[in-house]
Amino acid sequence: MHTCIRLRAERQKRGWTQAVVSRMAAESGQAISQYEISQLERGRLNPTPPERDALARVFQIAPEALWVLVESESESEPEDRSVRRAREAQARADAALERARERARIAKARADATVAKALAQARRSQERLASFAPMEATP
């Protein structure tokens, strides 16, 4: 059975969605639905020769680089699944870290604005106090 070991990795490396790959395959002359891309990535669907060629054109690599013959899917599936889960967990962690950094940048900007506002208010207060010179007593 042919199964795609690298299709998902190549797609994710480029930051493409399955829908983008589907559209690009159609533009290259071979209609492949998003559902079919998903099934191909999971090894649940065998690609036709035209589909293999179209996807190779989309990714600009040799078809052999995307498609390999796997003798026993049950032997490779647990490792592939665990690797995929680890990559997905890493991607989620990276996204969470980026969101935390963005929240920290926003909080710092707000704090800086608050400090600047407080300093400006303190300066104005000092200037007002300085304008009230002590009155000299008249004899």
Image (cartoon, rainbow, N blue to C red):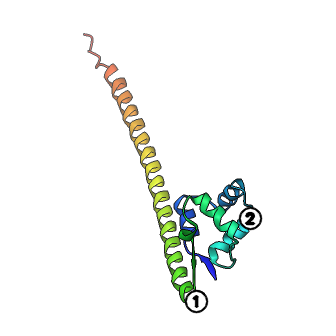
* Residue 63, horizontal then vertical, whole percent: 58, 67
* Residue 45, horizontal then vertical, whole percent: 69, 77
| Residue projecting furthest to the top | 139
Q: Nearer the viewer, residue 75 or 64?
A: 64
What residue is shown with label 1? 72
Q: Nearer the viewer, residue 47 or 104?
A: 47
Mark 1, residues whose alpha carbon is within 10 Å: few (<14), some, or many (≥20)? few
Note whether 136 is above or below 21 in the view shown.
above
State which tag comes first along the sequence, 2 or 1: 2
Rendered image quadrant of residue 14: bottom right
Under mark 1, the amino acid is Ser
Q: Is residue 47 left or right of residue 90?
A: right
What residue is shown with label 2? 33
Q: Secondary structure at mark 1?
A: loop
Q: Nearer the viewer, residue 9 or 115?
A: 9
Q: Quadrant of the N terminus?
A: bottom right
**Residue found 44% across the figure and 49% down from its top:** 105
Note whether 133 is above or below 89 in the view shown.
above
Q: Is residue 45 left or right of residue 117?
A: right
* Residue 74, horizontal then vertical, whole percent: 58, 89
